[in-house]
Each structure stands twice: as structure tokens, then as C-alpha cells.
Image (spheres, rainbow, N blue to C red):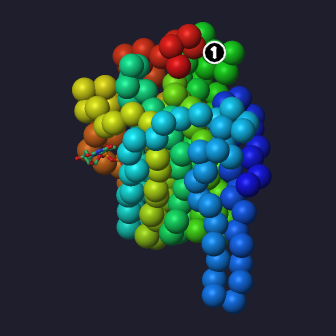
Amino acid sequence: MKITELEVPGVFLLEPKYFEDSRGYYCESYSKRTLAEIGLNADFVQDGHSLSREKGILRGIHFQRYPHSQTKLVRCTRGRILDVAVDLRKGSKYYTRWVAVELSEENRRQLWIPKGFGHAFLTLSENCELQYKVDDFYCPREDRSIAWSDPQIAVDWHLTAEPTLSEKDKKAPLLKDSDVNFATENC
Ligand SMILES: Cc1cn([C@H]2C[C@H](O)[C@@H](COP(=O)(O)OP(=O)(O)O[C@H]3O[C@@H](C)C(=O)[C@@H](O)[C@H]3O)O2)c(=O)[nH]c1=O
């Protein structure tokens, strides 16, 4: 597995090794031991799986507030997405900085997103299936969104048309009006 820390520290790109043969392939798509060797530790308790049928669907920017913040390990097993992680830890040197990577069925990459970060993605193809592990259970009380177009964060989505959003995401506040409660010391 090739593991690379990205421009916003704490976010890692994972490229698992695929063993191909005439039958197809085998890969360890997740190994707690391999990740722990470089200090990536999380006790994953839930796997999520979503399907987005159309190109141009945008989900996010999502997170659960402290103390139910989640480390996420994200992969796209069908189609192609632009996956984004945003540092929302007040006091962080990288507060509001984001990274974007393409994850796809073809490139087989995964993104490690630590607690205190928001997560969002845009579908770049039809029928995108996203699978991700999280290390805290779903907690609707602490579940939050921030507007995908927030000017303080200013993700460059490379959009050519308005994205398709959920009703929840249409109503998402700007970061300056949100009640995000991450601090660097509690993530
Ligand atoms: C996230 C989640 C949702 N749900 C339910 C609630 C709701 O009725 C339905 C759809 O939820 P949402 O609209 O929040 O789904 P979605 O917009 O796909 O939310 C996801 O977006 C990406 C970007 C993430 O990072 C995820 O953590 C999650 O927030 O699924 C659960 O039961 N458990 C969960 O863990």
C-alpha cells in the first residue's frame, strides 16, 4: 500500500496494492495493521455505502460535531468522484484549507480524512458508488452540513453547471454562521 500525506496535514491518499492474475485480482482494501504502522489509527465501527445516479451530484460539506466527530476512510468502487476534505479545526494552521482528489473505480485510491474535517464529493460520472468506514456511529443530533459553495472555504469544484443537492444541503449554512465546535485539541 502506498500512503501519501497531502497538502493539508492529516489527510492521506492510500493506494492499495492489487495482485492481478488470470482470475482477476486480490487486494487488502483495508488493513488496520498497515495503517497503524504509520500512525493512522481508528476503530472503525460503521461502513457506509451510497449510490449517486447522476453526474453533477454534490454531497456535503458534511461532518459530525465533537464529541461524535468521525475519522473517514473513503473509496469509490463504481464511477468517478472528486472527493474533498476541509480542515474545520478552529486554531489549526490549516483552518478552512481543503484538498481535492479524484477517486474512481479505475484508480482504486482511498482518502483518509481525520476528525475535525468536513467531507464532500462531486460525482464526475453516472452511477457513483461510495463506500466509507467511520469510527463513530451516525448521530443525527450532531450531524451538520456547510454550504458546498462557502466563499471562506472556496473549493474549486471545476463545475460547469449547478450541482444537484439534497434538501438538507440546499439549506446548509455558511461556515461563519455554523455551530461547528472542533478545536485542534479535541480532535
Ligand atoms: C450518514 C448517514 C445517513 N443515514 C440516513 C439519514 C438519511 O435519512 C439518509 C441520507 O443521509 P444523508 O442525506 O446525510 O446522506 P449523504 O448526503 O450521503 O451523507 C453523507 O455525505 C458524505 C459526504 C459523508 O461524508 C457522509 O459522512 C455522510 O454525511 O441516510 C444513516 O442512517 N446513517 C448514516 O451514517
* Residue 174 image offset from top left, x and y in percent: 42, 25
* Residue 105 image offset from top left, x and y in percent: 58, 68
Specify the quadrant of the image occupied by residue 52: bottom left
Q: Quadrant of the N terminus?
A: bottom right
Specify the quadrant of the image occupied by residue 178: top left
* Residue at (60% x, 10% y) in the render: 91
Disc 1 marks a residue whose amino acid type is Ser
* Residue at (50% x, 40% y) in the render: 72
**Disc 1 designates what residue?**
92
* Residue at (39% x, 57% y) in the render: 49
Can residue 6 be seen from the camera position used here?
A: no
* Residue 176 image offset from top left, x and y in percent: 45, 17
Q: Residue furthest bottom?
A: 22
Q: Is residue 176 above or below residue 30?
A: above
Mark 1 lies on a secondary structure that is loop
In this view of the protein, which residue sits in the foreground, 165 or 18?
18
Question: How many numbered markers are drawn?
Answer: 1
Pointer 1 local density, CA inside 10 Å: few below 14, some 14–19, many at least 20: some
Q: Is residue 181 above or below residue 109?
A: above
In this view of the protein, which residue sits in the foreground, 124 or 26?
26
* Residue 161 image offset from top left, x and y in percent: 49, 56
In the displayed structure, does residue 156 sit left or right of residue 71? right
